[in-house]
Amino acid sequence: EIVLTQSPGTLSLSPGERATLSCRASQSVNSNYLAWNQQKPGQAPRLLIYGASSRATGIPDRFSGSGSGTDFTLTISRLEPEDFAVYYCQQYGSTGYTFGQGTKLEIK
Amino acid sequence: QVQLQESGPGLVKPSETLSLTCTVSGGSVSSGSYYWNWIRQPPGKGLEWIAYISYSGSTNYNPSLKSRVTISVDTSKNQFSLTLRAVTAADTALYYCARDRWVEYSSDWNYYGMDVWGQGTTVTVS
């Protein structure tokens, strides 16, 4: 099973700042099969990025994804108040899907 | 616009069987390229994928749950379901259904992510 480790666990930033979230895999991941999801309190997760770098429908261009192999990054260029949430990376491998443990992005 | 709605008992006794249903509206469970998933989230914790069933009926299960889980589809009702046997307190969670999409291109596959989620249904084992 591929284990995804996200860092940091919690990221404290202010609106307008740039956020960089990391997702590291225990073995190489097909970048076509790597996604990022956002979850706000009391809500279902929402797809942000698929294929490591493609934005889902309706996702603002301040969100971008990059990476390959075992290292992937979600970047939010300028934080808006609505961006403070928990972010999960997700991959598909030989044993199905796994999620990272999440990064909580909180207001500083 | 496709919408998903989970339904289930809310409370299940230890050792019993949990059955959940996800009703699909605005689209068909038989639509090509789509896969139908169950994911759960224990209180205060992260996401755990449970299983999927494809538009063609193929299935895949989380190895850690495989021995206790069955996923199925009822095309006449446009629903898919999850059965989880021999539940314990560790199965207490918010259970989501979600749709994702796979498209084959030139002997490889492109994955388009879980783009539609239900609102979730809470299951307590006690």
Image (cartoon, rainbow, N blue to C red):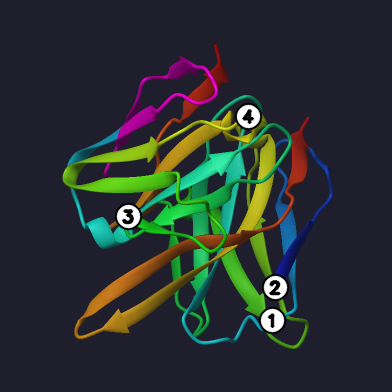
Three-letter code for the amino acid on which mark 1 is drawn = Gly
User: Does the CB distance between marks 2 and 1 fall below 8 Å?
Assistant: yes
Question: Residue A81 shows which numbered tag?
Answer: 4
Q: Which is closer to the viewer, label 4 or label 1? A: 4
Residue at mark 2 shares a chain with residue at mark 1: yes
Amino acid, disc 2? Val
Mark 4 / mark 3, whichever is N-terminal: 3
Q: Which residues are magenta?
A: A1-22
Q: With B98 as the anchor, is B74 left or right in this view?
A: right
Distance from disc 2 to disc 1, alpha carbons, whole Å, reads 5 Å
Amino acid type, callout 3: Ser
Q: Position of residue A96 (x, y in %)?
A: 37, 56
C-alpha distance separating marks 4 and 2: 28 Å
- The relative height of residue A107 versus residue B57 in the rendered view (above or below) is above
Q: Position of residue A74 (x, y in %)?
A: 36, 39
Circle 3 residue: A53
Badge 1 local density, few (<14 within 10 Å), some, or many (20+)?
few
Disc 1 designates what residue? B27
Q: Quadrant of residue B116?
A: bottom right
In this view of the protein, which residue sits in the foreground, B50 or B118?
Answer: B118
Q: Nearer the viewer, mark 1 or mark 3?
A: 3
Amino acid marked by disc 4? Pro
Residue under label 2: B2
Q: Secondary structure at mark 2?
A: loop
Q: Nearer the viewer, residue B80 or A61?
A: A61
Q: Quadrant of residue B23?
A: bottom right
How far is mark 4 from mark 1, CA to CA? 33 Å
Real-space Cα distance between discs 1 and 3?
A: 27 Å
Chain letter for mark 4, please.
A
Tell me, yes or no, whether the two marked residues, 1 and 3, touch with CB atoms within 8 Å.
Answer: no
- Mark before the other along the chain sequence, 2 or 1: 2
